[in-house]
Amino acid sequence: MKKQNFIKGSVILMISAAVAKVLGAVFKIPLTNLLGGVGMSYFSAAYSIFMPVYAFSVTGLSTAVAVMTAKSRAFGMYGNIRRIRRTALLMFSVVGVAGSLLILLLARPFSVLSSGDNEAALAVAMIAPSVLFGCITAVERGYYEGMSNMYPTAFSQAAEGIVRVVTGLWLCGYVNSHGTEIMKYFPEMTDVRALAAAAGIAGVTLSSLGAMLFFAVVNIFAKKPKDKGESHLAERREIASELIKTALPIGISSVVTNLTAIIDMGTIIGCITYFGYKGDIPVGVAAEDIPRFVYGSFSGIALTVFNLIPSVTNMLGKGILPCIASAWSAGNKEVLRRNTVQALLTAAVIAVPSAVGIGVLSPQILHILYAGQSDEADLCISSLRWLMPGMVCLCVSFPVFAMLQGIGKPSSPLKIMLLGTAVKTVGNILFIPFMGADGAAVSTTICYGVILAVSLYTYLKAADIAISLAPFAAVVYAGVLCGAAAYLVADICGRNNTGDITAAIAAVIAGGFVYLLSLYLLSVKVKRTKTTACV
C-alpha cells in the first residue's frame, strides 16, 4: 500500500473531485435535456429528500474512520485498525439500512407534500438503497485515506461517475422511448416524465452500488498490513463512541447544508403556485406545470452549473485541516497564519475567475450545454448570474469550515449553517414572489455571503491571527479584468455572428490570459507594498 505525502494526496483528491464533477455534469446535462424542466422537478424532488438522510448517515463517516485509522497507524497498531474498520462497517451498515428504510417510508408522503401527487414517489423509492451502499463505501474510503493512500477514493469516485452516466442515461432514454409500454406496469402514474426521472435515479443507485463493489474487488488484491501482535486493542464500544463523536457534528452540518435544496423546492413551487408566475410562459408548458417547470429548470440547470467549482475547492478543506491542526497544537501562530492565507487565497484564485467567466458567458454556456431545452436555459441565464457571487463565497467557506474544525471548533460550522439556512428561507419568501427563480438565486448568494463573513470572523478571532487583504484584492481586481476581456471578445464574436462554442472558447482564452497576466503583475506589486491587516 503506497503512502502519499500531504501535497500528493491533496492533488489526487482534487483531481478526483474534478473528474467526478465532470462526470456528474456529463450525466446531469443530457438528463436535463431528456427530462425537461418538469421532469427534472421529479428528479430533484427525489434528491432533495435523499441528500439530508444521506448526508447525516455518510458525511463525516470517512473522516472519522480516516482519523482513527491514522492515529493507530502512527503507532503501528494494525490489529486496532482492523477492529476499527470492522466495527465501522457493522455499525454503519445498520445505519445505512435504517436510512434506506426511512426514505422508502417517506417516499409517498413526501411526494404528495412536495408536488401534491404521487408522481415523484417512485423516484424517491429508487434512490433509497444508495444510503446503505454509501455508508459501506464511506467506511472503505476512510480506511484507505487513513492509511495515506488516496488512490482507492479517487478511483472509486471515477467508477461511481462512469456507472451513473452509462446506466442512468441509458435507462432514462429507454423509458422515454418506450414510455407507453412501460407505463402499463405503473397504473398509479400518469406522467411518463416522472417514470423517466425514476429511471435516471436508478442509475444513481446503481452507481453507488458500483463504488461499493469496486472496494470489494480492491480488498481482494490489496496487500494486508502485517499484525505486529499488539497486546492492547480498543474496545468496540470505545471505537463506536469515538466514531459517533467525530462523525455526528459533520453529519449534522451537512444535513443543514442540504436543507437548502428542500427550501428551494418548497418555496419556489409554493410561492409561484400562490402568487403566480411573472414571466412569459413557454410554449407547450401547461399553466399548472409552471411551478414545477421553474423549480426543475433552476435546480437542474442553474444549480448544476453553480455546484461545479465548489465541489473541487471542497477538497482544499481536507488538505488544509491536518496542517492547521498541527500548527494550532504546536502554538505556532506564524505557520497557522501562512497556512490560513494559502488555503483562502488558493480557493479565491480558483473561484473568482470561474464565477466571473460563468457570469459573463452564461448565455453561451447554457445554450451549448442545454441545446435541447432552450426555454429552460433562457429562464436560468439571469439566475445563474445572480448565483455567481454566492459561488465565490461558498468556495472560500469550505476551507474556513475545515480550519474551524482544526482549531477545535467543530460545532461552529453547524451554528453558522443554521444561520445561513434561516437567511436563505427568509430571502426565498421575500424575493421569489417578485423575481421567480432569480429570487431564489439572490437569496442563495446572500446566504453564502453571510456564511463566509461570519465563519471567517469566527475563525480569525478564535485563532487570534491577522491576514493581509492585499492579495485578495489583487485576485478580485484580476477577476474584473478577466471578465472585461471575456465580455469584449464575446461581444465581438456576437456582432460577427460567431457560433456560441467558438465565442465561448475565444472569450475563455482571452479572459484566462488577462487574468493570469494581471494576477502575476499585481502579485509582484503586492510583494513590494506594505499593506494593512484585518482580524
Image (cartoon, rainbow, N blue to C red):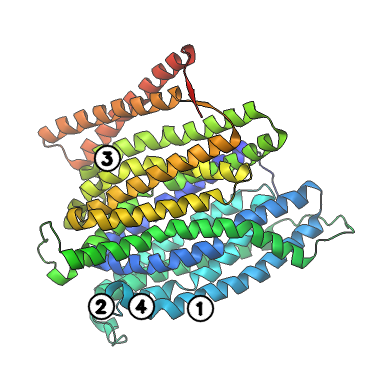
Percent coordinates x, y for residue 148 in the rendering: 67, 47
Left/right of residue 406 with respect to residue 368 in the rendered view: right
Residue 142 visible here? no
Question: Residues under labels 3 and 1: Cα distance?
Answer: 41 Å
Question: Residues under labels 3 and 4: Cα distance?
Answer: 35 Å
Which residue in the rendered view is the most extreme toward the top?
528
> Considering only vertical position in the picture, is 403 above or below 523?
below
Q: Which residue is mark 2?
A: 179
Give the mark nearer the N terminus: 2 vs 3.
Answer: 2
Q: Amino acid at mark 3?
A: Gly
Give the mark nearer the N terminus: 2 vs 1.
Answer: 1
Q: Say few, some or many: other residues with alpha carbon within 10 Å of mark 4 (under 14 / 14 to 19 / 20 or more).
A: many
Q: Say few, some or many: other residues with alpha carbon within 10 Å of mark 3 (under 14 / 14 to 19 / 20 or more).
A: many
> Image point 55% across, 53% down: which residue?
155
User: Which secondary structure, mark 1?
Assistant: helix
Question: Residues under labels 1 and 4: Cα distance?
Answer: 14 Å
Q: Amino acid at mark 2?
A: Gly
The disc placed on residue 359 is 3
Q: Say few, some or many: other residues with alpha carbon within 10 Å of mark 1 (under 14 / 14 to 19 / 20 or more).
A: some
Dot in front, 4 or 2: 4
User: Which secondary structure, mark 2?
Assistant: helix
> Image point 43% across, 27% down: which residue?
472
Percent coordinates x, y for residue 446 in the rendering: 34, 46
The disc placed on residue 121 is 4
Percent coordinates x, y for residue 156 in the rendering: 54, 57
Q: Which residue is mark 1?
A: 101
